[in-house]
Image (tube, rainbow, N blue to C red):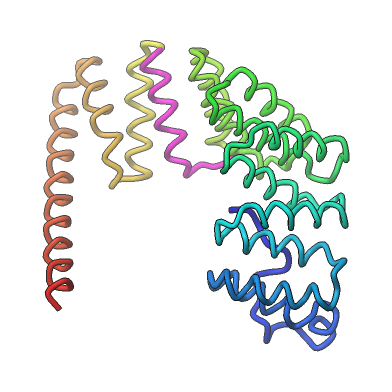
Amino acid sequence: MGSIIVSGKGIEEFNLEDKKYLGINFLKGCKNIEDMKYDLAAEQFKKALNKNPKDARVWHNLGKAFTELRNYNEAIKSYKKAISLKPALIDSYINLGLVYEKIRRYKDVASIYKKAIRTNIPEIYKIFHLYGQMFMDLKQYKRAIGFFKEALERGPDLAKSGNIFYDLAFCYSRIGNYERAVENYKEAIELLPFFSSAYFEVGCCYEKLGKYNLAVDIFQKAKNLSPGYMDFLPKLITDKIKVGDQTGALREYKELQRQEEELKDMVAKLSIKLKKKRIK
């Protein structure tokens, strides 16, 4: 959940000046997080704070460690401290909001996101996107749509907006506006051409609109992108029958049977391996 500040490098990759500026405990803590040793990370960040208690990055990363340890109260305190020290630290707003959402404190989610919006920090579109996702999870799709639109208007690079278009389309589909859903799913696909879930959702929208030929075409593309993904096949079979392609439907049905047999065989082999481990 969320990000850490200054990661992606092993400690040995930082030069002496970096180590002096960032502090060896801070760097060790980052490495511990990357290695999923969150209790050790928390200890290193606490040591770093003893040396520099006003470093927002350390408080942020301590919040990350506490979050992974499911110590949400301490995570909240740490992220709040990071924000108080550096109000433009967007990752702290994001992570704090995600913690509040995880423990179902939705009023606090709204409060921290509103605070971020008032601060007008860089990349604020991320906050609007997360705000929309919260309402989407609560099945308040119309409210979510407003925030997703705002996120897109706030100007993320096109390369970063594919997931926003996808979420916007999902909400339109859930309120029955399938035409608008298709438009936005197509935007997502244009930006993320290997996003097989978007193809699947477009096909479902075409089904709702009674456009079965288009549904067949899009499910076929989805199948070609993810040949091992079985969820597309029942849809493809049903829609091919509806458009009169009995031969194609039979071919897809045989493919579905083959995949089901492979899956059963895989499960059986895995079961045998697990039994052998238990015997040992």
Image quadrant in which the C terminus is located? bottom left
Main secondary structure found in the magenta portion? helix
Q: Quadrant of residue 254?
A: top left
Residue 237, horizontal then vertical, whole percent:
21, 27
* In this rendering, position of residue 1 left or right of residue 156: left
Identify the residue shown where x is 74% and y is 40%: 156
Residue 249, horizontal then vertical, whole percent:
18, 27
Identify the residue shown where x is 47% and y is 44%: 194
Identify the residue shown where x is 36% and y is 11%: 210
Q: Is residue 202 depicted above or below 99 in this figure?
A: above
- Residue 63 painted magenta: no
- Residue 197 painted magenta: yes
Identify the residue shown where x is 48% and y is 41%: 195
Q: Quadrant of residue 3?
A: bottom right
- Find the magenta span and give its range: 191-208
Q: Quadrant of residue 128?
A: top right
* In this rendering, position of residue 18 left or right of residue 172: right
